Image: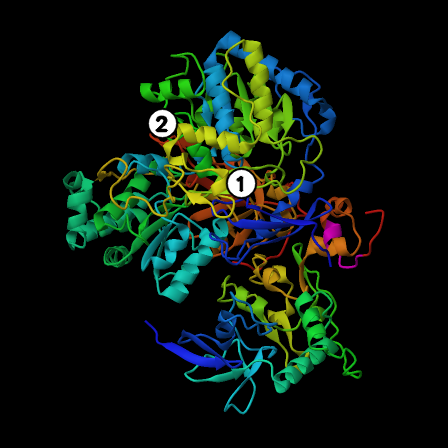
Amino acid sequence: MTDDITLTIDERPVTVPEGTTILQAAKSVGINIPTICYHEFCTSNGLCRICVVEVEGSRTLVPACVAKVSQDMVVRTRTPRVVNARRTILEMLNASVDLSEDENIQDLMHEYAADEARFPLAEPRQHAILDDNPMYIRDYAKCILCWRCVQVCADDAQYTYAINFSGRGYHTSISTYYDLPLTETTCVFCGQCVGVCPTGALKPKREWLMELGYTPDQIMQMTRTERKSRMRRPQASA
Amino acid sequence: MIQPDRIVSTTCPYCGVGCNLQMHVRNETIYRVTTPFDAVVNRGTLCVKGRYGYDYVYNKQRVTTPLIRKKLQKPGKRTQAFDLDEWRQVSWDEALDYTTQRLVEIYQRDGSDALAVYCCAKATNEDNYLLQKMFRALFQTNNIDHCTRLCHAGSVVALQMAVGSSAMSNTAAEVIHNDVFILTGANASENHPIIALQMKKAIQKYGAKLIVVDPRRIELVNYATLWLPEKPGTDVPVFSAMAHVILKEKLFNPEFIDTRTENFQDFAASMEKFTPEFAEIVSGVDRNLIVAAARMYASAKNGAIYWALGIPQHVHGTDNALALINLALLTGHIGRLGTGLNPLRGQNNVQGASDSGAMPWHYPGYQRVDDEAAAIKFEKGWNQPSGSLNRQLGLTTTEIVSHIAPDGVRAIHIMGENPMMSEPDLNHTRHQFEQLEFLVGQDLFINESHAFADVFLPAATFAEKDGTFTNTDRRVQRVRQVIPPRGESRADWEIICDLAQRIEARLEVPTARWDYAHPSEILEEMGTLVTEYAGVKYKRIEQVGLQTPVYDDNHPGTPFLFAEKFPRGRGKFHPLEYHACAESIDQEYPFILTTGRVLEHWHGGSLTRHSWLDDLYPEALVEINPVDAEALGVKSGDTVNVRSRRGSIHLRCKVTEKTTPGVVFIPFHFHEAPANILTIEAIDPLAKIPEYKSCAVAVTRASEKDLKNPEAQQARGRY
């Protein structure tokens, strides 16, 4: 039996079991803290920092998805400092990544009045679409490095370890070992990664072909060689 | 970004795990499959087949109009017609009238024994219930079976003998409550991928210990505390030697044995000869490993055993399963949460098809056909004259094939199955099929079996109909129509009802009832005849499935069995003897062949070889251990010839330690190199299951020119 902890979130008293995160504690009283990289069924890593809150006595803002509650903690989830941090995070993400398919981030951009042109000199991350297998494509121009795909490929679900971070800083990306095509890695194409990808960076291949303008009939008539082809444009002759 | 018109929740059509699928549909095209993270069975995870393998629904080779063969087929001269040019597109009326006429003609001329039917573990409970009802009520035949015979028949018979029930005793997700579990004859990572994930989690996060007993170094060996690499077919000595150690070291559970079991003394006496030394000689497993495994399992708080087809698919398959049951009874590792005897069922609905009576010895609910009270019950239930139902046990799957003869089986109706890929000794099966007088195929594709048919009835896929599947842990789950049936295809239950009504009209008999408006009415009818399904109603399983038995409308279902007692009363120990496999190796055929499946494919290949899944694993590969490969002078990718006394195939080899020296493994999905050309039609005397897991073969180098499709190749890095 764990001890209960009482704290204050946005001036409201909250009692939760020891070990609860600030995010869960807030949720238990209906206070919504925005998240991006967090996923209820994945290990939280506090990567994106959109969930930061102000904790009295703490020098820095605290990521609510990983920070545990403590007795008499005083948490404020929407101070000007917090809002400013969240807005900046959104503006920086938007400056380098194609967020067009992430409805959650789009809503947050709107909610926090993020300025899409805040960083006009920023260089968007450029990645060619990786189409190296018959099941799903990887469009890392849309990747926000939330790490969910890596987590579910590893100990959160599949124990397959086919993908991980590669590179440093701005050049960080998700990759296979030595950039091998997925077919030649330990990948078993379970698609857990596709299931948790928030931005459309990972997508079933047939869905992607439909987006490119192929009709379902054209897709299903493709020969194996056509399916493997890396240069693909919508065409009536398929 | 595509927005779905709708998202439909249904159950995966592949393996027995029974994962929930959320199918996203746009313009009647399924384009994405997801699954909720709170799904009771699979918790947000899927495997490659569940997530991407539905595209066979849209495959261009799928047949969606009824067909009749242009050229009349004669017994002995029957041929295979894969080409649509050899078929005539007809109306449903014509196809069903023709089927009626031919079946009734043969029935009236040669009687009930001339007819046989293969039901289908891929189809719904409702489809199977109706098909067996049609043949039992209208044609008075019990020649009704499905692929359970080729799969867990040995386990079913053994469990019936020892405890009186034949399903998995526990819920798959309970594996996290095991502290020691044995996995034998099962490659869960490839064949029950989601259960394998739960096993890995149990080991990595909950500290469970795994003992793998398997001739193959399956992926889960990476997670195992002990691996006992036995020779194929030596399960009785290995597990009995474990029992021997448990008896000698007094690690058994005397209280459980006293209160819950019988026949202990006879059993204990028969274990005397199974010393670890004897088992080592027979099985090749180090005696110390056997002792260690026995101590680990017996001293567990919660021990459980999981097995799949490596156990039953032997001529002594029933004995193999009994050896496992003996261990559970000896240690009392059954009847509690996190313990148990768990045969992992292969097909999405093999449990349900068996429950629905798609078997030659049982009506729905395992009520024996030779039991007078049961027969009378079904005569009443199906509105049939008293004494009309056949009291004789029918023919099993393999027996149906071997009984095709002028005075034996003349006509077969096949729903979904593909015996021309899945039966052992396919050259013999082919010869037998050629002798048939009439064959009905009811399926999606003209597969190797339906190519022999006279009439083809195009069925709807799982995504185009409503119904229920019963998964491996006895959970009855909803299958929902996602898209309208393609072309003129119809749900199996509708085809059967239409056909049965035509047959009844022609026979001028009272109706057994075929006027259902919805499959829910069929399941309710089955519930009136099968007590375990009495409380399973569609309205109760809209969100979460119910685990049978469900005795009435208020019964909550049964997550684990045998808490108080066994269905037969006491659990019965069975004394065992060691019997060798049907065929042993010799100088001419020096390798043991064992067959099975791979992650990317399903059985005879009707579904997955018509899916993009085939791109991931496009050709048959024989697995050879590096030691043997060096002796043969072959390396991965080389073409080899594998032959047995019954046939020969050519395929590329994969040199891997996944198979042990002296043993080669071939998956049986590939018509270009069907493993079952090689397998032996030797069957277990009790369960009638063929010995797919062991026969003697020779392997020699061959040329790539011998391959039927040498272009099909895909480099893969997965284990």
Magenta-highlighted residues: A225-232
Q: Nearer the viewer, mark 2 or mark 1?
A: 2
B181 or A46, nearer to the observer: A46
Where is residue A60 shown, x and y percent of the image?
56, 89
B436 or B673, nearer to the observer: B436
Give the labeled residue for mark 2: B367
Q: Is residue B94 above or below residue B418?
A: above
Please tell me which residue is depicted at 15% across the width and 54% down the height of the picture: B250
Q: Is residue B159 on the magenta stretch? A: no
Q: Is residue A1 above or below residue B632?
A: below
The answer to whether one can see residue B423 in this image is: no
Chain-order first, disc 2 or disc 1: 2
Q: Of helix, strand and loop, which one carries label 2?
A: strand
> What amino acid does circle 2 point to?
Gln
Question: What is the residue that sits farthest to the right in this orientation?
Answer: A236
> What amino acid does circle 1 point to?
His
Where is residue B79 shown, x and y percent of the image?
63, 23
Question: What is the residue that sits farthest to the front in this orientation?
Answer: A12
The answer to whether one can see residue B314 in this image is: yes
Give the labeled residue for mark 1: B603
Q: Is residue A99 above or below residue B110?
A: below
Q: Is residue B412 above or below residue A153?
A: above
The subunit carrying tag 1 is B
Q: Is residue A229 on the magenta stretch? A: yes
Horizontal placement of B623 versus B254: left or right?
right
- Give neighbour class at mark 1: few <14, some 14-19, many 20+ (Cα, 10 Å): many
Please tell me which residue is depicted at 60% across the width and 26% down the height of the picture: B495
